[in-house]
Image (spheres, rainbow, N blue to C red):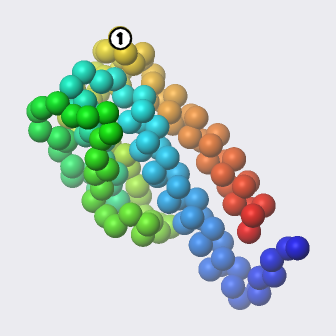
Amino acid sequence: MARVIRFEDIGKYTQEQFEKLLRVAVLETDSRLKQESPVDTGRFRASWAIGQNSAPFRGQPEGTYSQAPPLAVNYQLGSEKAGNVYSIHNNLPYADPLAAGWSKQAPSGWVDNVAKNMQTWVNAQADRIGRES
């Protein structure tokens, strides 16, 4: 049975659905970037951070990190709102060369491939949310 939404509630409903999708898309993108990251000491993988309207995280200090990197964010998870800009970034000095294929573990274009795959994933999740709502 279809859900009944009053006309005056359409905007609020649409925003809630969008923010639900935004929440899962941000976390899924972060997870995929970490999974695809080349690993030597694990510092690069552990230095991905999620930013809301900024990208201040400078990355983890030198050292050896486990395969399960911490989640670095500069906002309260679950508070994603339409109108904010969310970024997933890695500010280590060697992040750009790794993204460009400098490591044999990660070919050139791997970050772009994650982004393209996420576009397909987001479309599928939007369809799912639409069907379940």
Q: Is residue 64 visible in the rendered structure shown here? A: yes
Q: Could you tell me residue 76's position as x and y percent?
A: 34, 67
Find the residue positioned furthest to the left. 62
Q: Residue at x 46, y 52 (%)?
A: 26
Q: In this figure, which residue is indicated by the disc labeled 1? A: 104
- Vertical position of residue 25 compared to residue 10: above or below: above
Secondary structure found at label 1: loop
Q: Could you tell me residue 80's position as x and y percent?
A: 45, 66
Q: Residue at x 31, y 33 (%)?
A: 67
Q: Could you tell me residue 55's position as x and y percent?
A: 27, 51
Report crowding for label 1: few under 14, some 14 to 19, many 20 or more residues within 10 A (C-alpha): few
- Vertical position of residue 57 compared to residue 20: above or below: above
Of the pair 113 and 63, the residue shown nearer to us:
63
Find the residue positioned furthest to the right. 1
Q: Could you tell me residue 37's position as x and y percent?
A: 36, 28
Taking the image as shown, residue 84 lies to the left or right of residue 69, namely right
Of the pair 115 and 59, the residue shown nearer to us:
59
Q: Residue at x 35, y 11 (%)?
A: 104
Q: Residue at x 25, y 40 (%)?
A: 47
